[in-house]
Structures are given as C-alpha cells and as structure tokens.
Image: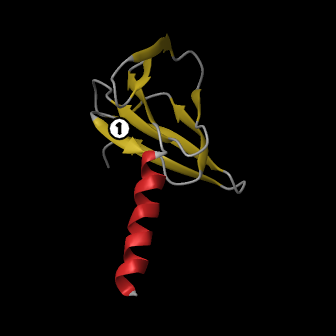
C-alpha cells in the first residue's frame, strides 16, 4: 500500500512539474531581455525606463530572474502572490539568478542601486 501511495505521489509531482513553463528575464543595467528558459529563444528586449520593471507570471509558470549588473549593486524586488500578499526583498544583482516562489503572480524589479558597505 505504501508503494502505491508513493507511486501516485511521484506521478502527480511529475505531471505537475512538467506542466510548468519557465520564462527568464535578464537584467544588465537598464537593459532587459525576456526569453524562454528551455529554448533560450529571445521573446523581446527593452530598456528599463521606470523605477520598477513589472513582470506578470502566468498560472503555474516559474520566473527565472537573472540579475547580471556589471557593478556590485542590489535591486529591490517586490513579489505579489495569488492570495493578495506581497514580499519585498533586496537582492544582490551582480551575476545572480533567482526563481519565483510558488503562487507568485507578479514581480516588480527595481533599478540597480550601488551597494553601500558598512
């Protein structure tokens, strides 16, 4: 009985994980590139002209956030969830990759700010 339960759990996990698509948004200074994570096919590129760049996350998708600023910088990232809550983080943005947490529906990525050493 335990093997059947485990098998069903693994099957559900595999089906759920294969249903997710991953898109990637790459930041390098003010340049922003969005592309398909699996195929590396560029979807579009733009320039970040506002304080925050907004990324919508479709149902069951995962966002790969590639922060590749050329200098030691941080970015404020605000993540909104399907239950109405939000989370704010200050992320290292020189060559770091982050993935969206479960149930994220929108991410705002702030402009790069030089790191202050204390």
Q: Find numbered disc 1 in the image and state the secondary structure of the residue it sits on.
A: loop
- Specify the quadrant of the image occupied by residue 23: top left
Relative to 86, does residue 71 appear above or below in the rendering? above
Q: Residue reaching furthest right?
A: 84
Count every numbered label the image shows and give the total. Answer: 1
Where the N terminus falls, by quadrant? bottom left
Q: Position of residue 101 (x, y in %)?
A: 49, 52
Count neighbours of disc 1 (C-alpha within 10 A) and say few if under 14, some if 14 to 19, many if 20 or more.
few
Q: Residue at x 44, y 70 (%)?
A: 8
Q: Nearer the viewer, residue 24 or 5?
A: 5
Q: Position of residue 111 (x, y in %)?
A: 49, 27
Left or right placement of residue 68 versus residue 58 in this view: left
Left or right placement of residue 59 versus residue 69 in this view: right
What residue is pinned by disc 1? 115
Left or right placement of residue 96 versus residue 82 in this view: left
Q: Residue at x 38, y 43 (%)?
A: 98
Query: Which of the colour schemes (rainbow, by chain, secondary structure, one colour) is used?
Result: secondary structure
Q: Residue at x 40, y 16 (%)?
A: 42
Relative to 19, does residue 7 appear above or below in the rendering? below
Q: Position of residue 17 (x, y in %)?
A: 43, 51
- Specify the quadrant of the image occupied by residue 41: top left
Q: Residue reaching furthest bottom?
A: 1
- Specify the quadrant of the image occupied by residue 95: top left
Q: Position of residue 6 (x, y in %)?
A: 38, 76
Relative to 90, does residue 8 appear above or below in the rendering? below
């Amino acid at each position: 009985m335990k093997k059947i339960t485990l098998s069903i759990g693994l099957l559900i996990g595999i089906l759920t994980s294969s249903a997710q698509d991953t898109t990637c948004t790459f930041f390098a200074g003010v340049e922003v590139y969005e592309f398909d994570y699996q195929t590396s096919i560029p979807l579009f590129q733009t320039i970040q002209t506002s304080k925050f760049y907004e990324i919508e996350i479709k149902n069951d998708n995962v966002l790969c956030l590639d922060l590749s600023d050329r200098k030691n910088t941080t970015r404020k990232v605000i993540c909104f969830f399907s239950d109405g809550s939000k989370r704010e983080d200050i992320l290292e943005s020189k060559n770091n990759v982050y993935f969206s947490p479960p149930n994220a529906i929108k991410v705002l990525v702030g402009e790069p700010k030089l790191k202050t050493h204390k």
